[in-house]
Image (cartoon, rainbow, N blue to C red):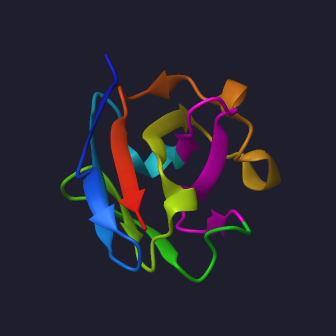
Amino acid sequence: QVQLVESGGGPVQAGGSLRLSCAASGYTDSSYVVAWFRQAQGKERVGVASIESAGSTRYAYSVEGRFTISKDSAKNTLYLQMNSLTPEDTAMYSCAARKGRLGHVSFVSVLYTYWGQGTQVNVSS
């Protein structure tokens, strides 16, 4: 059974940084695409960053240059390093996974099979 558990969220001031983690179990990292999504209050869930099993990454325009997605295959853990945070980054952040590749549709949430419970990020001005 695949399980995803996020951690690392919390309050932070604008301009600060946070690193989110997503500990995965129940699947082999080499065959899955994983991604971070976020959902602000009253808004739809949107893709933030994704990484394919081979290592290729995608970023939403709003976070490119500020966020970095990475993974530690030995620990089966996904990370999201978030720098230069702004209040617009406030949201519930969730990691998601599915077997195979998604490429240019990696931000389509319904394509993902497994989801974590989420971790809240609150950025104050």
Taking the image as drawn, is residue 72 in sight? no
Say left or right for 29 vs 109.
left
Looking at the image, the residue that sits furthest to the left is: 75
Residue 67 visible, this angle: yes
- Residue at the spot x=23%, y=52% of the render? 8
Question: Which percent across, then down, holds residue 24?
Answer: 28, 38
Quarter holding residue 117: top left
Placement of 91 over or under 27, stated as above or below: below
Q: Quadrant of the C terminus?
A: bottom left
Q: Is residue 55 left or right of residue 109?
A: left
Residue 41: say if magenta.
yes
Between 73 and 84, the one nearer to me in the picture: 84
Q: Which residues are magenta?
A: 37-60
Q: Position of residue 85 (x, y in %)?
A: 45, 71
- Quadrant position of the N terminus in the picture: top left
Q: Nearer the viewer, residue 19 or 1?
A: 19
